[in-house]
Image (cartoon, rainbow, N blue to C red):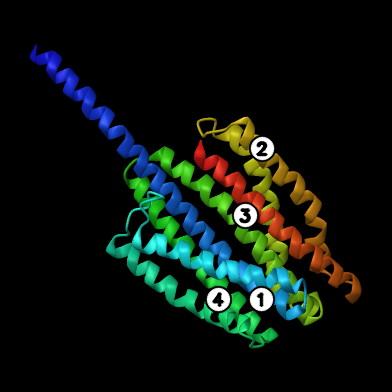
Amino acid sequence: MNRILHGLLLTMAIALALPAAAGEAMGTDQQTRLIARQGALAHRLVRGMCFIRSGIALAQNERVVQETLAEMDRGFAALYDGDAALGVPPPDATMRGRLDRANALRTRLTDPAQALLAGDEVTTETLVTLSARAAALETLWHDLHEAIEQAHRTAGAGEEVLRGQVIATAGAQSRLLQAAGSSACLVDLAGGREAAPREADRLAKAIDTFDRNVFALTFLRPAAAPEMPNSPELETAATAVWIDWNGQRPLFTALASPDATAETRRVLEDMSYGIEFLDRELEDTLAIFMRL
């Protein structure tokens, strides 16, 4: 009788622990997604400001800047205070210190954006500086993700590490997309590739990395990591991103070495809408993965 009772109690304990473990994993997933998204939003903010400075799709890009500021605030608050609805736990003291450093740099991006929306003008030189700040902020977010991943490795949570890597890579695609748009705009403002070699190099690297990642996420990930979740819905969404990227890619490569000013303006406007379309597709595809 005691053995039976012990078995029942053990079964109940395991059953009660499983939802808690699943909830903890889901919270970590959301934490990883939010961190990756913050890096993308930094570049999205600069990209929107640059397109406004260039006079490209003004109404759309003013909306992009407004929405990005709001999303940055929501995501940062969830990371800094925790978010019960998402299952994101409040950070420990070490992580909160990292978040404080990220917030200090984040403010140096958001303040000029708010000033631009209030009617202030932004110079090309300021945009170059903001692009560098976005890259520095990206590094801080990357380091924070690395710390979380290392904690999982130490705990022996191999599946969580692999899942987190997929989420981080998928989230990085939005960052690369927005960074490429920002660099393309800065190359155009400078008057061409030779006048802005650093931004032209960043543009080329972002295109190349996005290209490799989108292929890997679509075709290599399911084969290399069969234990990771997959579904017909996810496969269809990932393939759609890959197809649409191949349709948009010529716009980015054209801006890497623009020839005619008139043609460049048309390409930039098409790119402005294309980036936002792809960004939504990337976010929707990641959301499918996280539900599995």
Kind of element beneath mark 1: helix
Q: Could you tell which of marks 2 and 4 lies nearer the N-terminus?
A: 4
Furthest-top residue in this view: 1
- Quote the CA–CA distance across marks 1 and 2: 35 Å
Quick one: 70 or 259, which is closer to the camera? Answer: 70
Q: Quadrant of residue 158?
A: top left
Drawn side of residue 112 relative to residue 239, left or right = left
Direction from residue 274 to residue 31 in the image, left or right: left
- Which amino acid lies under the numbered mark 4 shown in the image of this protein? Arg
Q: Foreground: 239 or 208?
A: 239
Q: Which mark is residue 254?
A: none
Identify the disc placed on residue 173.
Answer: 3
Please report whichever mark, 4 or 3, sits nearer to the chain's N-terminal start: 4
Please give the residue where the numbered disc 2 appears in the rendered image: 219
What residue type is disc 2 on?
A: Phe
Residue corresponding to mark 1 = 49
Dot 1: within a 10 Å radius of its alpha carbon, few (fewer than 14), some, or many (20 or more) residues? many
Disc number placed over residue 133 in the picture, else none: 4
Can you tell which of label 1 and label 4 is closer to the viewer? 1
CA gap, disc 2 to disc 3?
A: 15 Å
Q: Secondary structure at mark 4?
A: helix
Residue at coordinates 57% horizontally, 65% vertically from top-left?
A: 41
Q: Position of residue 124 (x, y in %)?
A: 69, 84
Q: Quadrant of residue 13?
A: top left
Figure check: 133 above or below 35: below
Q: Tell me which label, 2 or 3, sits earlier in the chain.
A: 3
Q: Are marks 2 and 4 in contact (CB under 8 Å)?
A: no
Give the mark, 1 or 4, whose residue is nearer the N terminus.
1
Amino acid, disc 3:
Gln
Calculate the distance from the C-alpha at mark 1 to the C-alpha at mark 3: 20 Å
The reply, left or right, for residue 104 in relation to residue 116 is: left
44 vs 290: above or below: below
